[in-house]
Image (cartoon, helix red, strand yellow):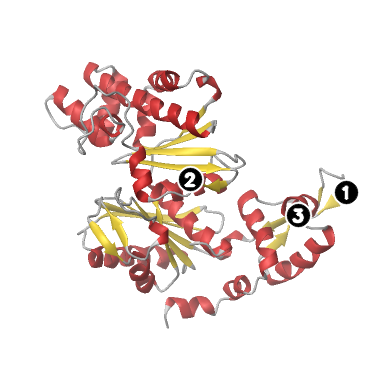
């Protein structure tokens, strides 16, 4: 029996598959925002009380949502039994691929991480990566129970005229892939539906639904690591862009007299802020090859070489954020990846960079959290959750 056949026999999976289309906004709202009174829920999804009752009754009977203990409705003061989605009945697999490692998590419907693992890639050939991801998934799902969907995220090719989720044949500069049918190959290996997303875009959705951007209609996320990624949300919707468009973001010129990036640009964002740029500059000063965490530790300890390099990287990141705020008018920018760690070490220089490009720099809220690749894998799981409850790719 295949995984798909096994899932098809589970009552909770059958219940989800039988949900009528008008009820999906109700489930989406409960997944993202948690338990709510019927009055609040009806208002948010634009339904009358009678319509909400009609749609939620079979969802309660099927076990997809449950009634909590009696509480008093904050709107009308009447006793009510808030509704909540039953999140622990379904599992989702999320995998973040880098140039040399795979990071995987299993979550429930509300993106709570239940299990996680990581492994060095034994090779970059598509067949090798797919086989290894299958082994990682098998081990994780043996501990958690089968997943109903999987999300895979990776960095795209900066020259690709398409989005990762708009083409069956994926290009990835980091992995050296050209025209690889990732979704089909991994879906066939796992036996469940699979979605493929740009890693920064998926992380942005994770923040929008379950993280720092929940309740924020307009925000941007800047991811700094081996490359520079970017995602923009306006009026609660992603501004869609090709991989080539996103690649241009990392090569915006910050200082025409600055260092040269691997693409030959002088003074672009990538020449200052990527991990490669930081390690190259620090290595030249230290006359050895440090690791990125070591550079940050030395910078915090006052080492003049590493402090100068990290300050410059944070300044460049601030310049990018200032440009984002000026061109899009968003006031909330989330910094992700290893660049977020540099931003915390040199916060004053980050803010100096923003001020260089934006006079009203105090109006911009910059959010950063410690860098963990498991968070990126969770973003991949959120891509799978979105696809499952919204029918999106």
Residue at (27, 19) in percent of width and height? 308
Image location (x, y in percent) of residue 274: 29, 35
Q: CA distance from mark 2 to mark 3?
A: 26 Å
Query: Do the residues under discs 1 and 3 have CB atoms within 8 angstroms?
Result: no
The N terminus - image quarter: bottom left
Q: Is residue 297 left or right of residue 21?
A: left
Q: Is residue 315 left or right of residue 177?
A: right
Circle 1 — which element? loop
Q: Is residue 358 left or right of residue 243?
A: right
For residue 204, which numbered disc appears in the image?
A: 2
Is residue 78 something that shows in the picture? yes
Is residue 152 something that shows in the picture? no
Q: Which residue is mark 3?
A: 46
Query: Do the residues under discs 1 and 2 have CB atoms within 8 angstroms?
Result: no
Image location (x, y in percent) of residue 233: 53, 43
- Classify mark 3: residues with Cα within 10 Å, few (<14), some (14-19) or many (20+): few
Q: Which residue is mark 1?
A: 78
Q: CA distance from mark 1 to mark 3?
A: 20 Å
Q: CA distance from mark 1 to mark 2?
A: 37 Å
Q: Earlier in the sequence, mark 2 or mark 3?
A: 3
Q: Is residue 68 left or right of residue 116?
A: right
Circle 2 — which element? helix
Image location (x, y in percent) of residue 130: 29, 66
Q: Nearer the viewer, mark 1 or mark 3?
A: 3
Q: In the rendered image of this protein, does residue 163 appear above or below residue 235?
A: below
Quarter of the view holding residue 59: bottom right
């Amino acid at each position: 029996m295949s995984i798909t056949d096994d899932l098809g026999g589970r009552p909770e999976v059958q219940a989800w598959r039988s949900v009528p289309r008008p009820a999906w906004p109700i489930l989406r709202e409960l997944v993202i925002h948690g338990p709510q009174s019927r009055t609040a829920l009806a208002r948010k999804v634009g339904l009358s009380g009678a319509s909400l009752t009609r749609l939620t009754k079979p969802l309660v009977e099927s076990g997809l949502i449950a009634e909590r203990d009696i509480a008093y409705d904050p709107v009308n003061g009447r006793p009510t039994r808030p509704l909540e989605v039953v999140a622990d009945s379904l599992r989702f697999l999320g995998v973040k691929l880098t140039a040399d490692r795979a990071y995987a998590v299993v979550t429930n419907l509300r993106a709570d991480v239940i299990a996680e693992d990581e492994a060095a890639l034994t090779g970059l050939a598509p067949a090798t990566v797919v086989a290894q991801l299958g082994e990682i998934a098998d081990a994780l799902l043996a501990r958690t129970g089968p997943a109903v969907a999987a999300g895979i995220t990776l960095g795209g090719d900066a020259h690709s005229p398409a989005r990762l989720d708009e083409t069956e044949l994926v290009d990835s500069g980091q992995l050296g892939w050209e025209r690889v049918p990732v979704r089909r190959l991994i879906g066939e290996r796992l036996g469940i539906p699979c979605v493929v997303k740009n890693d920064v875009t998926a992380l942005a959705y994770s923040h929008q639904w379950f993280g720092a951007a929940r309740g924020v209609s307009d925000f941007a996320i800047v991811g700094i690591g081996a490359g520079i990624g970017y995602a923009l949300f306006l009026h609660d919707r992603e501004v869609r862009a090709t991989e080539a468009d996103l690649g241009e973001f990392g090569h915006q010129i910050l200082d025409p007299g600055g260092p040269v990036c691997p693409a030959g640009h002088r003074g672009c964002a990538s020449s200052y802020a990527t991990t490669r740029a930081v390690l190259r500059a620090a290595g030249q000063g230290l006359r050895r090859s440090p690791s990125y965490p070591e550079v940050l530790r030395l910078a915090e300890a006052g080492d003049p070489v590493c402090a100068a390099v990290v300050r410059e990287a944070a300044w460049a990141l601030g310049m990018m954020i200032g440009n984002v705020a000026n061109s899009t008018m968003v006031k909330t920018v989330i910094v992700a990846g290893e660049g977020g760690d540099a931003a915390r070490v040199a916060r004053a220089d980050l803010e100096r960079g923003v001020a260089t490009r934006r006079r009203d720099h105090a109006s911009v809220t910059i959010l950063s959290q410690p860098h963990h690749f498991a968070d990126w894998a969770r973003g991949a799981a959120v891509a799978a959750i979105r696809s499952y409850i919204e029918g999106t790719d």
